[in-house]
Amino acid sequence: MQVKMTVNGTEVSGEVEPRLLLVHFVRDHLGLTGTHWGCDTSQCGTCVLWLDGEPVKSCTVLTAMADGHEVRTVEGLEVDGKLDPVQEGFMQEHGLQCGFCTPGMMMTARWLLDNDPDPDEDTIREAISGQLCRCTGYENIVRAVRWAAEHGGEKESEREPQESSQEVQA
Amino acid sequence: MTSTEQHAAPPTTSPAGNPIGFGRMLRKEDARFLRGQGHYLDDLTMPGMLHAAILRSPVAHAKIMSIDTRQAEEHPKVKAVIIGATLESLNLAWMPTLSADVQAVLATDKVRFQGQEVAMVIAEDEYSARDALELIDVEYDVLPPVVDAHKALDPDAPVIRDDVEGRTDNHIFDWESGDKARTDEVFDKADVVVSQSMLYPRSHPAPMETCGTIASMDKVTGRLTVWSTNQAPHAHRTVYALVAGIPEHNIQIISPDIGGGFGNKVGIYPGYVLAVVGSIVTGKPVKWVEDRSENLMSTSFARDYHMKGEIAATRDGKILGLRVDVLADHGAFNGTAQPTKFPAGFFHIFTGSYDLEAAHCKVTGVYTNKAPGGVAYACSFRITEAVYLVERMVDVLADELGVDPADLRMKNLLRPEQFPYTTKTGWEYDSGDYPRALQKALDMAGYDELRREQREKRERGELMGIGVSFFTEGVGAGPRKHMDILGLGMADGCELRVHPTGKAQLRLSVQTQGQGHETTFAQIVSQELGIPPEDIDVIHGDTNNTPFGLGTYGSRSTPVSGAAAAVVAQRIRDKARVITAAALECSPDDLEWEQGRWYVKGDREKGKTIQDVAMLSHGTLELPEGVEGHLDASVVYDPPNLTYPFGAYICVVDVDPGTGEVTVRRFIAVDDCGPRINPMIVEGQVHGGLADGVGMALMQVIPFDEDGNCVGNSFMDYLLPTSMECPSWETGETITPSPHHPLGLKGIGESATVGSPAAVVNAVIDALEPFGVRHADMPLTPANVWMAMQGRPMRTDLAVQ
């Protein structure tokens, strides 16, 4: 079947099997491999992306269900070469190690901060509780989201343009 | 919350704002991961690539009567179907394990565990490959399985490994360590002897990325390229050469970014070998990536140690001896990944952190109808099991004597002046100040105040528990003369090239899985040469571009390859001295080193930076006799001994008396891994291990029902800790350098996984004191805790209750 949707602001279309999962469409058809896949049962949350502004586990969404809708993935977090404060926060607070859960975690974090710009630790823990991380013990993910809240966690549309903060030159 | 020790000198800063040498530095690898630009195995695509899927056994033990693949082969998108008989004709049906056993690549005669590989389908896409699995018809003649390890040696137990001629039972090995006679003597004269049986149940590392591979055999050149999720690319290359008979120089193994390993990605799985065969058969690159159920059912599990411990002491609490009898469930094939000499891994470090008169352990390994493995999951070759055993036994003894478990530990810990200390089972601990670490943890926890709070709560009928554990880790295997895997000595190479403009490349044999090697190894070289870490590129994970070495597991990267990186940098520094002397027309003895440059003693202005020397060494300067041009060096580092990190952990829990639900309220972890290259990364490693400890103690188990069905085969049943089960970790440090590592470093990757489960369990059992509970096995789920409160703790490895 033919599908058409907006992904990270760009209109895309494709011919897909009706059973194709959205995670596979995004990864294998669009080449956006930042969205990962980690379990068969919608437990791990490495596949979290946004569908019409809400985080969803894309292993539980058929591509057909996204037809005509708007998708945002981790590749859409950085705008005009400027990292989202959530991305900055994950780096500053060492909120990632192997990096596999990170895209899904950051998509949830961005959504949380858009809806609650100043969340406390319990709120952050609850927001990411549907996603698994095996490396960090969650502590630094919580700190990363707090960092983002303290450095421009308000809704992106309301954010003042600001100097890009320093990044490691690798 | 973090408590740190004062460091000697503040680091100077590079132009990019990074520390020169050790210190907190943001990670280089983050730039790609934050943007979704990591390259994990499943992100890779090759031209013409085909996709493979594996058909697995639905039963634990059965004879294969027939396999009919005709329908699958007729599927329009299927390119090949491989079964055991195909492999037999190529002499590839069986492959060697890491423990001198063999394992079926595809089952030919029998299936021996649920989830065992029976056939592989190769198709144009992944969905079609999985569709075609449904079209394969296998007829099984089901046999009774061996599920309970305690029944594996019964005379009437079904023989699992009848593939081995003459085998009449399920016995793998008996192994002993320590002095039995002397230990028995100590026990005979002791005032107090307490015994306790306990199970360290089967667990699974479950990294977020499952295992997978892409194999590409170029028939024209005879070159095999394998991209795979693996922690030890060089060892894999040698094994492929030995198994498949492909000349080793024609094999290239590439480990791309790895989404967590924890020991799950050390060995070679049948799927990897099958992808190679698939590429040979089809002439195309073949990708195979397992799903989560396959990961949990078939790849390396961890632990499964049934232990009976006995501890002997004087009435006033001096621990005299320890005796342990272990029944080790190794599954259907003996595939444990550990140094050859040690069939029970490093379990014989079970005397822990205490000064004993005698100790003895006996380990018996048995086959069962379960997946193979055993040594995985940040276990430091079974030091997890050893630490859990001794730290539970100390608490059991404290309970028997009616003394505080922290006091009992303090009384018996090794004292700083006893180091280097040789244990009763032959380990030489390099350095330590144990009482200081324990005292620091007690202070951070506010231990006396917690005990007071507990007393008050008990009077109100509330259940609060405080658990203490103290661990000694042993990491950084070899030395090579004592330690090998499949005959490959455990020493690691390292190469450093400083380019003419003073920028450097470091090539490593070890493989990061999230530990941040691209950052920390650059910091090691920076520490020794003064080159900014952003100017040092760390290259790893490609056998064609890195020196040979045994890889990353057992927390060996920093103690072994970290030492190699320091030594190779020191060689460059020594060479730079000779070149500086030639340039300045003085003697090398006249020169003195400061961060990043050699200068003339007494004339600080006159000198050459390492960057100057890099250009000189590649230029036209006349070099002294015997000195070659360029600024490169290589080394193979053979560690003289393990390093021995240690730590003191305290866990505080609340238990709901109505439901048995445990809440971890606080966790205090004081770790000593010697000096810290990057404190931010070290703390992150500790956090992750603490979450492992909470998970194993409270949630995680791979149990089996009486038919041998794996009941922990998805994340719906195999429960991993989320942000809700983990508290905000409170970490602290002491710093005791290793005397034999060139930079005093000890390794940290597995410390918290090794040390924390005992603290959590000790806390829960402490909370249950009003119920007279002395022990209950992990995981302490609400049901298990509630049953323990009724005096009937569960057998957690068998899903029969």
Image (tube, grey):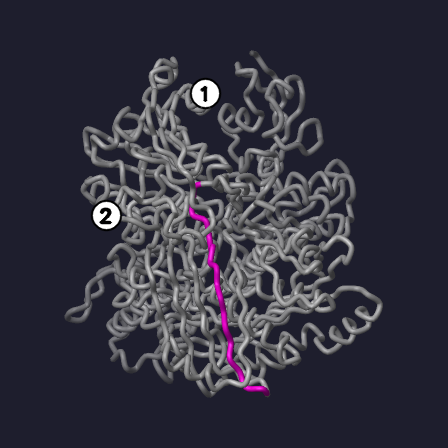
Q: Nearer the viewer, residue B322 or B170?
A: B170
| Residue B727 is one of the magenta-drawn residues | no
- What residue appears at the point 15 percent right and 71 percent down from the top-left corner? B625
Res B454 quadrant in image: bottom right
Q: Position of residue B324 (x, y in %)?
A: 45, 69
Which region is colored magenta?
A: B298-315
Q: Is residue B263 left or right of residue A133?
A: left
Q: Quadrant of the N terminus of chain B?
A: bottom right
Q: Amino acid at mark 1?
A: Asp
**Residue where numbered disc 1 is placed:** B131
Residue at 69% across, 66% down = B652
Q: The numbered mark 1 sits on a residue in which chain?
A: B
- Of residues B575 and B434, which is closer to you in this image? B434
Q: Position of residue B266 (x, y in %)?
A: 38, 50
Which of the 4 image quadrants contains residue B428? Answer: bottom left
Q: Secondary structure at mark 2?
A: loop
Q: Which residue is mark 2?
A: B166
